[in-house]
Amino acid sequence: MLAELYGPDNLVLENIAMQRITPAFFNTYDMAEIWASVPTPIPEYRIIVDLDAASFAKLSAAQVASALKRFLAGEILGYLHAKGERTAVPIRLQVPRDLRIEPTLLAQAFVTNPQGKQIPLSELTQIILTEQPHPIWHQDNERVIYVGGELAASAPVYAVLSMEQQLEGLDLGESGTLHTTNLGINPTRPDSLEGYRLHWAGELRLTLDAFRDMGMALGLALVAIYLLLVAYYQSFRTPILVMVSIPLGLIGVFPGHWLLGHTFSAASMIGVIALAGIVVRNSLLIVDFAREHEKQGWSREKSVREAGALRLRPILLTTLAIILGTAIMVPDPVFGGLAISLIFGAVSSAVLTVFVVPLLYRYWFGSMFSVE
């Protein structure tokens, strides 16, 4: 899970992330790990040279700064050009870590003025304790703060839908209202001029994009199948009966995922697209058989009964071939969903097609198959 917070004020964004969004993540079921792009406050000492005190001690600001650097960070005195070395080795003067002077203990460090008098650095400087500046993250030219989380076992969609109810319309006091975005089929672009926005991203956005593209591919596949059947039957209505086997196959897809405890994924959607082209053959066998025997003078009722009985064996053999060919992929974490869609979809289509298609042919679409 990934939440992107956009808004005009970076400090307000950090407060929203740490005080509102992060607790909502913690209170979400199955959340195992949570992080935010708001850095931990780090104290920082700023040492300012007192120009008046330095001038009174007959020292320049550069001399005081050099002494500070020598005590706190060390100083490079020169370079050693060793024989056989391609680069010079720096000679660095540095106080050992265990003896290093801290900014608050500058009274123990001294600098010698031109008159030979040792003056404590604490008398020549001013120490200000502050926090290290926080980085300002940007994405798409907008200020952004990231809050993310990892789920132990469940899918992100359930956690996001739960948090959506908590965070949509959240009152931010003087900063206005927090609105959530980017849960539609098409991604949206954040705009901080509209106020503070929580933009859902991460795995859920990738899933939505994948299912959108796969849904379009499924739609194009169905249109292509329909047009091919129209060209084959020379009819615009007969292909509708033949394609009934496709929704009959979809009936088994989701129970199959639930039965095996597998999440419906993009690979599962690919399996559905492939399934649509496979299970149409079940209806084709029945419809073609019935139409052929009607042309030979058989009654419609007898043609339908014979079609359902005699075509049961090739339909079951085709289904068995699909099961045996794809069963090896079921344990695979990536392609397991594809195999489950093909196996359970093919089984449900085979079982239901031999009953539903003959009935529809006989009672519902019977008038359109008159023999000339």
Image: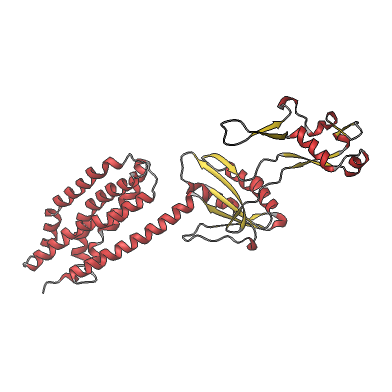
Quadrant in which residue 331 is drawn: top left
Residue reaching furthest bottom? 372
Identify which residue, 273 or 167, lies in the foreground.
273
- Residue 120 to residue 367: above or below: above
- What's the residue at 55%, 52% (across, down)? 164
Left/right of residue 50 with respect to residue 214 in the rendered view:
right
Question: Where in the figure is residue 82, as x and y percent of width and height?
Answer: 61, 31
- Residue 187 to residue 29: above or below: below
Residue reaching furthest top? 98
Identify which residue, 150 or 23, lies in the foreground.
150
- The answer to whether any part of residue 311 appears in the image is yes
Question: Where in the figure is residue 288, as x and y percent of width and height?
Answer: 14, 62
Identify which residue, 6 or 97, lies in the foreground.
97
Question: Where in the figure is residue 91, as x and y percent of width and height?
Answer: 68, 32
- The answer to whether any part of residue 366 appears in the image is no
Residue reaching furthest front? 83
Residue reaching furthest right? 56
Identify which residue, 132 or 118, lies in the foreground.
118
- What's the residue at 56%, 31% (across, down)? 84
- Residue 315 to residue 132: above or below: below
Quadrant in which residue 234 is drawn: bottom left
- What's the residue at 17%, 62% (across, down)? 287
Identify the coloring. Answer: secondary structure
- In what quadrant of the picture does the C terminus appear? bottom left
Left/right of residue 183 with respect to residue 335 in the rendered view:
right
Count how many numbered circles sit on residues in the image.
0
